[in-house]
């Protein structure tokens, strides 16, 4: 059978197997190769929460998903087109995520009685036909293949067996027309001096490629063209590495050496590991024994004039709370990076969540305001980290940067910035007394309300710091009630002045309309993708993404109030939602899922399509009721039960029914009917009138008990809606 090439716009692939099967490595190799090819891409590594879970168990499944495209994309995709399952547990966990009709590539050798039982299978899905009606299943004896291919190498069967992930990689390289040369170079560098391992993995990869090429199981290959990205020099980058580079860039621009005081905690540890390898850039790292030691060491470093950073995740922020209050009252520049994970307590260390917003805003004793910025994408972690450093130094305040596990471990193509184009970070250390021969450590800059930064030991600039309230200007210990009130207001006002640094809010879509999708942090990609889809479907939907959470942008309130409805997707139970409601007094609605996984764009689209408390104008939903495609695009396979609003009637909507497809004079059209029971229209009206109207079922040309606004099987879009049913003057049909 001949092979065919099919050009597609995008594809989503998920590799899944035991935590020891090398799924993250395999996904990383496919990702880097895809970046070299020039596709836009987004990835989602999914680590097991129990790293030491027994082999073959459901809890120990590791996965890596990548979406790549010839167009601009924002997410790693909702459901994969192809699932590579290396064992029964991986199939069990991820089968339900695969799109209907999708392709399963399965390591048949792993489907032993023991592994099947461990994964909870009563029968072998490779033999009982349970998958055949829903998916294209391609079983491959990967272990046997690599064992035969590497028979001449002086390696143990165990080491040879580990190359099966590269066999699977070779299969996918063939399916999607990816070159193998970059991976071969990576193998030589990664395993330098271990020639047998290099050769085994290379042979396994080529064997997988050649198997897919020669077998008739793969009759179609797919080609995804290069994406049209802005010109520049790109690299593939994940969020933790981008954060580290952002800190280093801030160090270079400010001419301050970085000090990182941190306790290693998942998923923030990679920032510590990365910065510790950059000592040649003047970076100092201190791996503390606990979270409190980490942050207090960083406060000490800030006091002595370093660009000071501490990194952690949610439980660590809880432990650092008192020390952060100390940094706030001493008004020292400190960057606090919180890579959020599932909670509470130990929770889900390897799973993503937007769980710490309340803690970032309010999780300290007393009135302890702190600017809070949240990164939007893996690449944006660079700019968010840089901005956090700039604001911390300029305003002499701790700043918290929120990322999350999805951003930290996920990756995307990132255009390397021109350092000259980054906003400058000017550091001005106090050199001399600032008030009639005296040094007042809390004498503030009029524009920013920042206090001067004096290096300890500078002659004539002796001053005290500590956790007890400071007297205004002098910094002496003060118990004066009025002074405490003034200092509390000043610290808050200083945070509020950061608004002057925030650019005007970008609106994707119109600046007013029926629905605003309002996002923050890692929900950017799904929200933007959902907005694009809904706009294509005719919805009056816009999207705003908020990076600065404290303070909020100056213009955000006016914009939010310009939309009839506001939807806030979050991976929590509504923390940002409550903030928006409180600040702007709008009846925003939440889309809240706490599953340890990002919200998918399809989930947001489904929320809007089904209503779910978010009612939007559907006036432009159908623009042509004659052609088949325009109607089908909006109606087919969708459950619109509450599509049209009833004029002049509260809380009553029309049902939309889509009927069978018919041929009319050779033209294919779908039949539909939008109607509501007559009694619903009359509900709440004068009782005698209701009785009268219900008895006369053919009044106003209405035949039967339903009122219609149109149907194609009646060849009308006007329906039988009578003017007499409008209860308000000037009520219009919708």
Image (cartoon, rainbow, N blue to C red):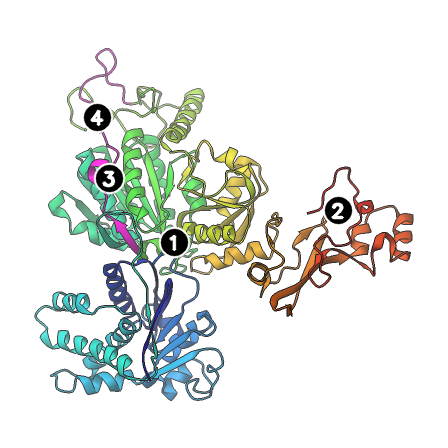
| Prevailing SS of the magenta stretch | loop
3D distance between C-alphas at marks 1 and 2: 40 Å
Q: Are marks 4 and 3 in contact (CB under 8 Å)?
A: no
Nearest to the observer: residue 289 or residue 147: 147
Q: Residue at x 20, y 70 (%)?
A: 180
Which residue in the structure is indicated by mark 3? 308
The answer, for residue 526, to whether it is visible in the render is: yes
* Marked residue nearer the N-terminal end (2 or 3): 3
3D distance between C-alphas at marks 1 and 3: 32 Å
Mark toward the viewer: 4 or 1: 1
Give the left or right position of residue 465, taking residue 618 as reference.
left
Q: Is residue 430 magenta?
A: yes
Alpha-carbon neighbours of circle 4 within 10 Å: few (<14), some, or many (≥20)?
A: few
Percent across and percent down for residue 79 are 43, 66
Q: Are marks 1 and 2 in contact (CB under 8 Å)?
A: no
The span picked out in magenta is 412-441
Toward the left, the furthest residue is 193
Which residue in the structure is indicated by mark 1? 74
Mark toward the viewer: 1 or 3: 1
* Marked residue nearer the N-terminal end (4 or 3): 3
Toward the top, the furthest residue is 436
3D distance between C-alphas at marks 2 and 3: 60 Å
Mark toward the viewer: 2 or 4: 2
* Marked residue nearer the N-terminal end (1 or 3): 1
3D distance between C-alphas at marks 2 and 4: 65 Å
Percent across and percent down for residue 343 are 42, 56
Alpha-carbon neighbours of circle 2 within 10 Å: few (<14), some, or many (≥20)?
A: some
Q: Are marks 2 and 3 in contact (CB under 8 Å)?
A: no
3D distance between C-alphas at marks 4 and 1: 39 Å
């Amino acid at each position: 059978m001949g092979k065919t090439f099919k050009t597609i716009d995008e594809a989503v692939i998920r590799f899944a197997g035991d935590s020891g099967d090398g799924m993250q490595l395999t996904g990383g190799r496919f990702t880097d190769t895809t970046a070299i090819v020039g596709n836009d891409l987004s990835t989602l590594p999914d680590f097991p929460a129990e790293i030491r879970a027994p082999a073959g168990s459901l809890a120990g499944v590791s996965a890596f998903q990548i979406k790549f495209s010839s167009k601009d994309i924002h997410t790693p995709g909702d459901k994969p087109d192809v699932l590579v399952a290396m064992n029964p547990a991986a199939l069990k966990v991820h089968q339900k995520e695969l799109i209907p009709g999708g392709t399963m590539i399965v390591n048949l050798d792993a489907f032993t009685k023991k592994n099947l039982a461990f994964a909870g299978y009563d029968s072998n899905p490779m033999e009982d036909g349970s998958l055949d009606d829903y998916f294209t299943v391609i079983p491959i004896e990967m272990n046997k293949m690599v064992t035969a291919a590497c028979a001449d190498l002086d390696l143990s069967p165990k080491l040879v067996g580990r190359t099966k992930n590269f066999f699977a990689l070779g299969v996918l390289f063939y399916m999607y027309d990816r070159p193998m040369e970059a991976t071969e170079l990576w193998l030589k560098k990664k395993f330098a001096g271990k020639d047998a391992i290099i050769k085994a993995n290379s042979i396994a990869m080529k064997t997988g490629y050649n198997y897919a090429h020669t077998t008739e199981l793969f009759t179609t290959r797919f080609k995804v063209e290069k994406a049209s990205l802005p010109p520049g020099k790109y690299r593939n980058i994940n969020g933790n590495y981008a954060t580290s580079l952002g800190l280093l860039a801030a160090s270079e621009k400010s001419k301050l050496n970085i000090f990182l005081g941190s306790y290693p905690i998942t998923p923030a540890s990679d920032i510590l590991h990365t910065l510790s390898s950059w000592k040649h850039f003047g970076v100092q790292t201190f791996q503390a024994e606990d979270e409190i030691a980490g942050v207090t060491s960083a406060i000490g470093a800030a006091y002595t004039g370093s660009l000071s950073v501490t990194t952690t995740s949610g439980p660590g922020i809880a432990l650092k709370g008192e020390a952060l209050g100390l940094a706030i009252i001493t008004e020292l520049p400190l960057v606090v990076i919180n890579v959020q994970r599932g909670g509470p307590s130990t929770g889900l260390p390897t799973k993503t969540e937007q769980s710490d917003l309340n803690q970032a805003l309010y999780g300290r004793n007393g009135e302890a305001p702190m600017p809070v910025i949240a990164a939007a994408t893996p690449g944006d972690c660079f700019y968010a980290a840089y901005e956090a450093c700039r604001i911390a130094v300029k305003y002499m305040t701790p700043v918290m940067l929120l990322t999350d596990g999805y951003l930290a471990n996920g990756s995307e193509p990132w255009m390397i910035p021109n350092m000259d184009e980054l906003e400058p970070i000017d550091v001005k250390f106090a050199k001399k007394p600032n008030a009639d021969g005296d040094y007042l450590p809390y004498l503030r800059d009029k524009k920013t309300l920042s206090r001067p930064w004096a290096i300890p030991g500078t002659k004539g600039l002796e001053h005290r710091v500590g956790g007890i309230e400071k007297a205004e200007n002098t910094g002496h210990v003060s118990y004066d009630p009025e002074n405490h009130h003034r200092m509390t207001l000043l610290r808050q006002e200083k945070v509020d002045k950061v608004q002057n640094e925030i650019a005007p809010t970008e609106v994707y879509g119109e600046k007013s309309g029926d629905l605003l999708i309002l996002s923050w942090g890692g929900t950017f990609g799904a929200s933007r993708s959902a907005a694009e889809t809904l706009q294509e479907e005719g919805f009056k939907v816009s999207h705003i993404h908020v990076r600065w959470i404290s303070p909020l942008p100056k213009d955000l309130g006016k914009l939010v109030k310009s939309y009839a409805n506001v939807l806030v997707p979050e991976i929590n139970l509504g923390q940002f939602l409550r903030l928006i409601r409180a600040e702007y007094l709008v009846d925003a609605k939440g889309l809240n899922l706490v599953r340890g996984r990002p919200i998918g764009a399809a989930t947001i689209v489904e929320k809007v399509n089904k209503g779910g408390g978010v009612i939007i104008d559907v006036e432009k939903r159908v623009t042509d009721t004659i052609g088949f495609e325009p109607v089908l695009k909006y109606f087919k396979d969708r459950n619109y039960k509450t599509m049209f609003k009833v004029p002049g009637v509260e809380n009553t909507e029309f049902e939309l029914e889509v009927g069978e497809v018919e041929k009319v004079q050779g033209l294919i059209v779908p039949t539909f009917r939008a109607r509501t029971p007559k009694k619903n229209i009359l509900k709440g009206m004068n009782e005698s009138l209701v009785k009268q109207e219900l008895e006369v079922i053919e009044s106003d040309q209405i035949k039967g008990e339903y009122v219609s606004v149109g149907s194609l099987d009646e060849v009308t879009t006007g329906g039988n809606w009578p003017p007499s049913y409008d209860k308000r003057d000037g009520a219009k049909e919708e």
